[in-house]
Every structure is written in structure tokens, then in C-alpha cells.
Image (spheres, grey):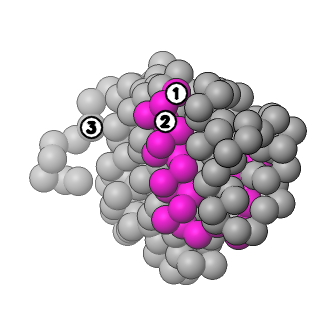
Amino acid sequence: MQKLSIEEIRRRFESAHEFNEIFDAFEQAIEQRIDDIELYRQLFWNQSLKVEELTLFGEKLSKEFSHISYDVYMWLARVFEVTHSVNDNYELALKYYRKAAQIKPNETRPYLNAAECYEHDLRIPPIYALIEFLKQGANTVPEPRPIYEKLAHFYELTGNDEMSMFYKRKLEEGSSSPPSATNQ
């Protein structure tokens, strides 16, 4: 196969509809060691790709270029949240926000973005999965106040007024330890 230029790879990522054509361009980008996240964003937004195909590309890209894996996972999460929400792929969005947080646990963005993708009417992703993820983030980020605010809100939605008040107090006073596990 003839070597594709970066412009041709970009064109295929943006507008190709045939999986094999997109896959060939992806393989060439990897072989050419192109690690430009902007190029791969075009791939992730290609509307012709199925969820499984996006996942395949994202996972392969993260393995090949670990230094951009945080951005890859954040973009995948965003794509699943926005373009595939009609298929209730909020759980996939949460999965990729979790992967991004594993790479950069001190970053607040994955936690807050995950909280924003909660659909109250559909109850997806599962609220307790979000709460656990946010609690993890509150323990790792340097400034957890925005996460405390989300936790207070989610606990309020679940009817757990005690935990909601606990996180509202944390917002006002700073951090302290959560109440015993029996109250959660």
C-alpha cells in the first residue's frame, strides 16, 4: 500500500464512511508514529464509526502513544457522551472518564465531566457508580470543592440527606473525613 500523507489520513478520518478505509489510514498513522491528538480527534468524531470501532481505535492509540492516552480517553468519553447518547452510552463515557482519571488522578476534569453526563430521568450512568467515582476524585485532586458540590447534589438526588449535608459542610469549611461507612 502506498504511504498516505497526513492530509490524506486527516481527510479519511473526517469523511470516509468505509471502515476498512478508515482502518488503513489509522494503521498508516500509527506506522508513521503520528501522535498528534488533533488528528485523532477527527477520527473520534467520524459519525460512521460504531461504538466498538471507536473503542478499538482509542485503546490501540493509547497503547501505542501512552503520553497522549489521557487526551484519548477524555475525547472518547466526550464522544460517547455527546454523539452516542441516543444509545445510552453514558456508562461508556463514565468508563473512559475513569481511565483518564487513572492516568491523571490529580485532574478535576474527568470527575466533573462524568458528573455532568448524568441523566436523571434515565438514571444513567448509575448514580452510585458516579458517587463512588467522585469520592475517589475528592481524595486525589488538589482542590476538591467542585467535586464536593457534585457529591452533595447526587446524595440529595438519592434521598441521603445526611451525606448531602456532609458534603455541603465540606464545601463551606474545607475537607474532613466522611462519616462512618454505615451511613453511606
Distance (Cα) linking label 1 and label 2: 5 Å
Question: Which badge, 3 or 1, is on the more N-terminal residue?
Answer: 1
Residue at image point 63% right, 62% down: 20
Residue 62 marker: 2
Image coordinates of residue 178 in percent, x first then y, are 27, 37
Pointer 2 local density, CA inside 10 Å: few below 14, some 14–19, many at least 20 = some
Left or right for 182, reference 176 = left
- Establish if 79 lies above or below 67: below
Question: Which badge, 3 or 2, is on the more N-terminal residue?
Answer: 2
Residue 65 marker: 1
Image coordinates of residue 70 in percent, x first then y, are 53, 32
Q: Main secondary structure of the magenta part?
A: helix
Q: Can the viewer see residue 152?
A: no
Residue at image point 54% right, 50% down: 57
Q: Can the viewer see residue 178?
A: yes
Residue 178 marker: 3
Left or right for 83, reference 31 = right
Tell me whether circle 1 and circle 2 mark residues in contact (CB < 8 Å): yes
Q: Is residue 64 magenta?
A: yes
Region rendered in magenta: 42-65
Residue 12 marker: none
Distance (Cα) linking label 3 and label 1: 38 Å
Pointer 1 local density, CA inside 10 Å: few below 14, some 14–19, many at least 20 = some
- Establish if 119 lies above or below 135: below
| Amino acid type, callout 2 | Ser
In this view, the residue in front, 171 or 34, is 34
Tell me whether circle 3 and circle 1 mark residues in contact (CB < 8 Å): no
Q: Tell me the SS state at disc 2.
A: helix
Q: Tell me the SS state at disc 1.
A: loop
Report the residue that reaches farthest toward the left: 182
Quadrant of the rendering where the N terminus is positioned:
top right
Image coordinates of residue 135 in percent, x first then y, are 36, 41
